[in-house]
Image (spheres, rainbow, N blue to C red):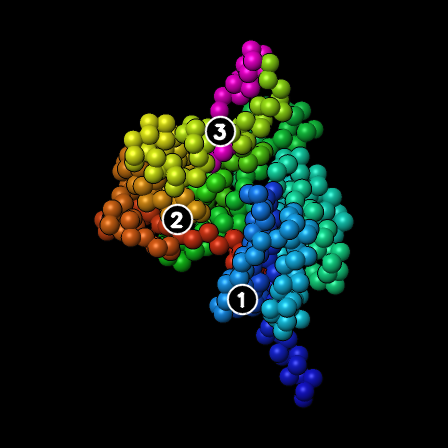
Amino acid sequence: MARLEAQRSRETLLIALILNSGSSSLKFHLANLKSKTIIAHGLADWAGNLCIYKLHSQSATYEATLSFSGPAPCFNHLVNDLQSRFQNEMTKLVVIGHRVVHGGKFAKATLLDSTALDEIKVASTFAPLHNPPALELIHEAINLLPDIKQIACFDTAFHSTMPKAAYTYPIPHAWTEDFKLRRFGFHGLNYAWCSTKAALMLGPEKTKLVICHLGHGASACAVSAGKSVYTTMGLTPLEGLMMGTRSGTIDPGIIFHLERTQKLSIGEIEKKLLKNSGLLGVSGTSADMRQVISLSQNGDDRAKLAIDIYCQRVQQAIGALSTTMGGLDAVIFTAGVGENAALIREKAIAPLGFLGLEIDPALNHACQPDCDISRANSKSRVLVLAAREELQMLNEIESLLNQ
């Protein structure tokens, strides 16, 4: 009887550690895999001069400055800290989930073995800022906790349902076949989460969604009947909407022009388009939308121009993606800018009344996700949903483990 009770106890307390590694941060969520309850969450952030470590739980908030940085050292610190603070829960740790931006050929979450790691490494050429730190973290997690299952969840996987005409570029066929150049798309974990959440809020008859993931990185996706049919990001996370420091789509001739007339190297141009463009490039001041909005409201013309370009790009994406689906039931705003910048939502939707989109100004400014900010008589709805990639990852991990 005691053994049976112990088994039941373990079955009801299966713990997952969800990790999201970037070039300058490591975010984490410790969660109950069955109930999806978040036990603790936080990050190690080494984007500045110091590495700041933060942990939040229901009972406490902790912050410290670390003398080291990088995915591997910070993961070691994280594991030690969690084991000291949540000893009982960490003894029930059964799986570590890794968010990987580019999954290459993978169309769903997968257990990490040598073959999977090789595929992620190959895909790193398409996501050089994102996949390498994820790989570093995965290897460290395997070395430190070899008896714990390791699973990767991919931001590209949700877009595996795109039709061939959507993911194929109009380039020489050999480039497509031999070099595997195609549209992959990103932010898929959040798109999957938002499409499921929207179905619950809107009902099963509202199937044509345009989801705008507006954060430091930004993209939009056409989701029809729960499946991705087109998205603005492509082979890499550089294509599509204007972003914090990334240009989004530009005339590719600009690259050749700069190389030919200004003698800039490909590496120099790539760095400028990735790290010195977007909101930062146009405003000349900041990649943070909050600061750009403040500058604009204080009369800064370049900041105003940055916002105008940003919103126009979002408007164009909503229109184009609606056309792709042959209609529109709802637009969804999500991620940091999408959830918090009422001005951007207002400006982006304002000229789209012809698509049946009308925002209620009071609801828009008072919005706390998850919410519907449409006017009562709006033909198409406008939702604001919180990005919860960690919950989507928990769902995908549980599904994989139950197979």
**Which amino acid, mark 1?**
Ile
Image quadrant where residue 111 sits? bottom right
Residue situated furthest bottom in the rendering? 1
**Placement of 369 over or under 257, stated as above or below:** below
Q: Residue at x 58, y 28 (%)?
A: 271
**Which amino acid, mark 3?**
Ser
Q: Residue at x 66, y 38 (%)?
A: 124
Q: Gap in Å between the C-alphas at discs 2 and 3?
A: 23 Å
Q: Nearer the viewer, residue 219 or 42?
A: 42
Image location of residue 51, percent across then percent down: 59, 49
User: Is any part of residue 36 visible from this angle?
Assistant: no
Query: SS class of the residue under badge 3?
Result: loop
Image quadrant where residue 97 sits? bottom right
Label at residue 339: 2
Identify residue for label 1: 39
Query: SS class of the residue under badge 2?
Result: helix
Q: Residue at x 58, y 33 (%)?
A: 235
Q: Are marks 2 and 3 in contact (CB under 8 Å)?
A: no
Q: How many marks?
A: 3
Crowd band around label 1 with a 10 angstrom C-alpha radius: few (<14), some (14–19), many (20+): some
Q: Are marks 3 and 1 in contact (CB under 8 Å)?
A: no
Identify residue for label 3: 277
User: Is any part of residue 126 visible from this angle?
Assistant: yes
First of labels 3, 1 by sequence position: 1
Location of the C terminus (image quadrant):
bottom right
Query: SS class of the residue under badge 1?
Result: strand
First of labels 1, 2 by sequence position: 1
**Placement of 201 over or under 132, stated as above or below:** below
Front of the two marks 2 and 3:
3
Q: Which residues are magenta?
A: 241-262
